[in-house]
Image (tube, rainbow, N blue to C red):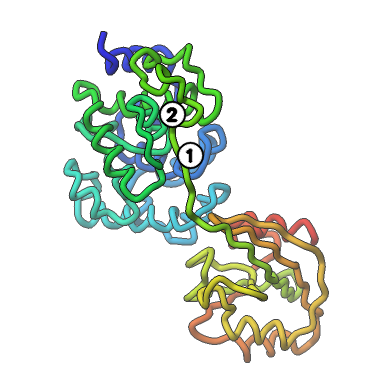
């Protein structure tokens, strides 16, 4: 039996029973793939079910508001993915009558859909011969073919894609791709791979050369940024102030508690908007506590600052805040729905 068939047989004996595998539906596969980009399967599944209950098809998603989609995405983080989902749904309904195209070049025109997601949808939903390349697949292929270069390097994706294409099972491309991903997540682990259980252990070159501990080679060049700042709690009765900045560095497009970074900053992109800075300087604040938050390549430490209520608080805010900043008052009990970031939950622990 050739390696592709061994992998195919192993997959059908060992694959997990996941809801998005029950039928070959492009919409459900698309949603699951986007959700899984930064989230583990077990954490994603209940959120996946709730999201599909709210948006059962591409048409309902296209008709939704951005706020509704971001709210339904709560708990998954990386909210630009949620906004791109809505943009993509609108694009698919307007350009493809609500059906995902079957051509790779057309799939790549859809907002938020890159090479991996496009190939995953085409192969899994339509059984088209496109090999995927995600983190798990890269690790499996690097070991199988003894790829010794840095898999995070500039040329790695192109070279590994060639290997993935050459290894693809054209008779069952969707199952083949899912099998490689399943193998990487269950057996071909980053550390202590379970080679004795692997269906590809015999032809795997890294296994035969006893190099699974050093292959794949991963050398990250991304610098970790440490940021310090303040998050402002400005309360009026039962409501708290949220703002939406047009040039916000993080949480783009979202209404958030006012946040400003201070101290040594990596670039001007991180500098606080002058109106948020003026807001902090014009009101009296007391520090309530400290909040830690992590966003890709950034570790953020924020002091939680609560504004001292005074009768002129609202009039001062109305005077300071103007275009291009939007702002609104929201009921505190609705904060996590209006500001669906873990920052909101961390702040509420102090109130």
Q: Position of residue 50 (x, y in %)?
A: 51, 41
Q: Secondary structure at mark 2?
A: helix
Is 2 situated left or right of 315 in this image? left
Q: In the rendered image, which quarter is residue 102 located in?
A: top left
- Outermost residue on the front side: it is 209
Q: In the rendered image, which quarter is residue 341 located in?
A: bottom right
Vertical placement of residue 31 versus 6, above or below: below
Question: At 24% from the left edge and 44% from the top edge, which residue is drawn?
Answer: 100
Question: At 22% from the left edge and 29% from the top edge, which residue is drawn?
Answer: 166
Neighbour class for label 1 at 10 Å: few (<14), some, many (≥20)?
many
Question: At 70% from the left edge and 65% from the top edge, which residue is drawn?
Answer: 302
Q: Which residue lies under the disc numbered 2?
A: 19
Vertical placement of residue 175 versus 87, above or below: above
Question: At 20% from the left edge and 55% from the top edge, which residue is drawn?
Answer: 95
- Outermost residue on the top side: it is 1
Q: Position of residue 37 (x, y in %)?
A: 45, 43
Q: Position of residue 14 (x, y in %)?
A: 43, 15
Residue 147 is at least partly visible in this image: yes
Between discs 1 and 2, the one toward the N terminus: 2
Is 326 situated left or right of 151 in this image? right
Is 293 situated left or right of 322 in this image? right
Asked if the residue at tag 2 contacts the one at tag 1, i.e. Cβ–Cβ closer than 8 Å, the answer is yes
Q: Which of the image's four quarters has the C terminus?
A: bottom right
Q: Which residue lies under the disc numbered 1?
A: 48
Residue 53 is at least partly visible in this image: no
Q: Position of residue 140 (x, y in %)?
A: 39, 28
Q: Which of the image's four quarters has the N terminus?
A: top left
> Which one is nearer the viewer's eye here, 230 or 235?
230
Q: Which mark is residue 250?
A: none
């Amino acid at each position: 039996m050739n390696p592709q068939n061994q992998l195919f047989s192993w997959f059908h004996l060992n694959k997990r029973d996941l809801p998005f595998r029950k039928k070959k539906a492009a919409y459900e596969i698309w949603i699951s793939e986007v959700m899984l980009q930064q989230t583990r399967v077990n954490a994603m599944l209940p959120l996946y079910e709730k999201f599909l209950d709210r948006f059962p098809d591409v048409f309902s998603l296209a008709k939704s508001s951005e706020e509704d989609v971001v709210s339904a995405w709560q708990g998954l983080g990386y909210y630009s993915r949620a906004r791109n989902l809505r943009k993509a749904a609108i694009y698919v309904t307007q350009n493809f009558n609500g059906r995902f195209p079957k051509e790779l070049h057309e799939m790549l025109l859809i907002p938020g859909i890159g090479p991996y997601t496009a190939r995953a949808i085409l192969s899994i939903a339509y059984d088209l011969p496109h090999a995927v390349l995600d983190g798990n697949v890269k690790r499996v292929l690097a070991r199988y073919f003894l790829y010794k270069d840095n898999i995070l390097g500039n040329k790695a994706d192109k070279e590994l894609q060639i290997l993935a294409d050459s290894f693809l099972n054209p008779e069952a491309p969707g199952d083949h791709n899912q099998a490689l991903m399943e193998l990487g997540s269950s057996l071909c682990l980053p550390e202590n791979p379970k080679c004795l259980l692997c269906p590809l252990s015999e032809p795997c070159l890294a296994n035969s050369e006893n190099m699974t501990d050093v292959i794949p080679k991963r050398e990250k060049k991304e610098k970790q940024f440490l940021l310090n700042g303040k998050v402002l709690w400005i309360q009026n009765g039962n409501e708290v102030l949220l703002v939406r900045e047009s040039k916000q560095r993080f949480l783009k497009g979202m209404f958030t508690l006012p946040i400003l970074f201070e101290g040594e900053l990596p670039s001007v992109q991180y500098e606080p908007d002058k109106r948020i800075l003026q807001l902090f300087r014009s009101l009296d604040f007391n520090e309530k506590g400290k909040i830690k938050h992590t966003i890709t390549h950034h570790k953020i430490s924020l002091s939680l600052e609560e504004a001292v209520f005074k009768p002129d608080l609202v009039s001062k805010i109305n005077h300071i805040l103007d275009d291009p900043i939007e702002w609104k008052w929201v009921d505190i009990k609705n904060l996590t729905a209006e500001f669906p970031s873990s920052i909101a939950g961390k702040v509420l622990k102090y109130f």
